[in-house]
Image: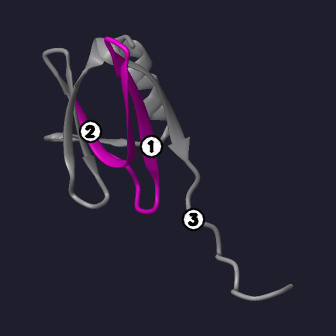
Amino acid sequence: MTEEHFTALLTAAEAKKEERGYSLPEGRSLTLYVASNGASLTVSRVQAAKLEKGLIHAQTIKGERYLVALEDCFGGSIDAPPSGGRKAGFL
């Protein structure tokens, strides 16, 4: 992934630039897809991220922190915001 690709992903997710990186609006998150030397990693439910010296610092909704190389990240997806919710049971 290039820096432009990463920035486009954050822009599409409506992330806001802050002092310490980018944060996504409440209820939004994104997923990063990373692979290196045949091993893959999916970092899901990312709520905050920043790019620093070729490294993506990602923080999930649960507070987990990941550091991955920008060059090893090959894609990302934007998770849909939660809808009004479905009631349990049959419709």
Residue wearing tag 2: 49
Inter-mark Cα distance, 1 to 3:
13 Å
Label 2 vs 3, first from the N-terminus? 2
The reply, left or right, for residue 63 in relation to residue 28 is left
Q: Is residue 34 magenta?
A: yes
Q: Which mark is residue 30?
A: 1
**Could you say which quadrant of the image residue 2 lies in?**
top left
Q: Secondary structure at mark 3?
A: loop
Viewer-nearest residue: 28 or 45: 45
Residue contact at pointers 2 and 3, CB within 8 angstroms: no
Q: Which residues are magenta?
A: 22-50
Viewer-nearest residue: 68 or 29: 68
Residue contact at pointers 2 and 1, CB within 8 angstroms: yes
Residue 18 percent across, percent down from the top left: 21, 43
Q: Is residue 63 magenta?
A: no
The reply, left or right, for residue 65 in relation to residue 80 is left
Quarter of the figure with the N terminus: top left
Up the image or down, 20 lies above or below 6; here it is: below
Residue 87 percent across, percent down from the top left: 70, 85
| Mark 1, other Cα within 10 Å: few <14 / some 14–19 / many ≥20 | many
Q: Secondary structure at mark 2?
A: strand
Label 2 vs 1, first from the N-terminus? 1
Q: Amino acid at mark 3?
A: Pro
Residue at 52%, 36% in the rendered image: 77
Residue wearing tag 3: 82
Residue 80 percent across, percent down from the top left: 58, 52
Label 1 vs 3, first from the N-terminus? 1
Residue at 46%, 54% in the rendered image: 28
Q: Amino acid at mark 2?
A: Ala
Q: Amino acid at mark 1?
A: Leu
